[in-house]
Amino acid sequence: MRFFDLRAAAIAAVCVFSPSIGLTQEIVLSAKDGDQKVTGTLIKYDGEFFRVETEFGPVTVDARTVLCDGAACDG
């Protein structure tokens, strides 16, 4: 199997097994008090918590404490 075939298979697996994410979606979560930001790729949002893959690893953030900016953010 060629590299491109493997890559396509991996992308298809992510879309099938994780339909809530689809393709990668970059977001920025800003603390409501403006002091801190988390930037990364949205892994999951369940309506209560954001799970974001950052340069330091995965981070879970309470949605009530942040403002979300990016295409994956609701409204």
Image (cartoon, rainbow, N blue to C red):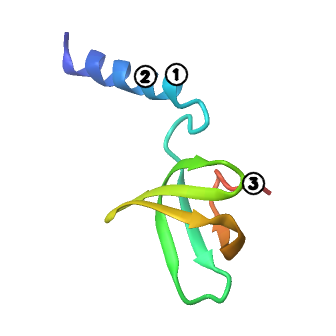
Q: Tell me which label, 3 or 1, sits earlier in the chain.
A: 1
31 or 23, nearer to the observer:
31
The label shown at residue 74 is: 3
Say whether marks 2 and 1 touch (CB < 8 Å): yes
**Which element carries disc 3, helix, strand or loop?**
loop
Specify few, some or many for label 3: CA neighbours under 10 Å numbering under 14, 14-19, or 20 or more. Answer: few
Q: How many marks?
A: 3
Q: Secondary structure at mark 1?
A: helix
Amino acid under disc 3: Asp
Name the amino acid, label 1.
Val
Q: Real-space Cα distance between discs 3 and 1?
A: 22 Å
> Is 73 on the left-hand or right-hand side of 2?
right
Can you identify the residue that label 1 sits on? Answer: 16
Image quadrant for the N terminus? top left
Query: CA separation, marks 2 and 1?
Result: 5 Å
Question: Around disc 1, counting alpha carbons within 10 Å, would you say few (fewer than 14), some (14 to 19), or many (20 or more)?
Answer: few
Residue at the location (56% across, 39% down)?
A: 21
- The x, y position of residue 34, in whole percent, is 61, 88
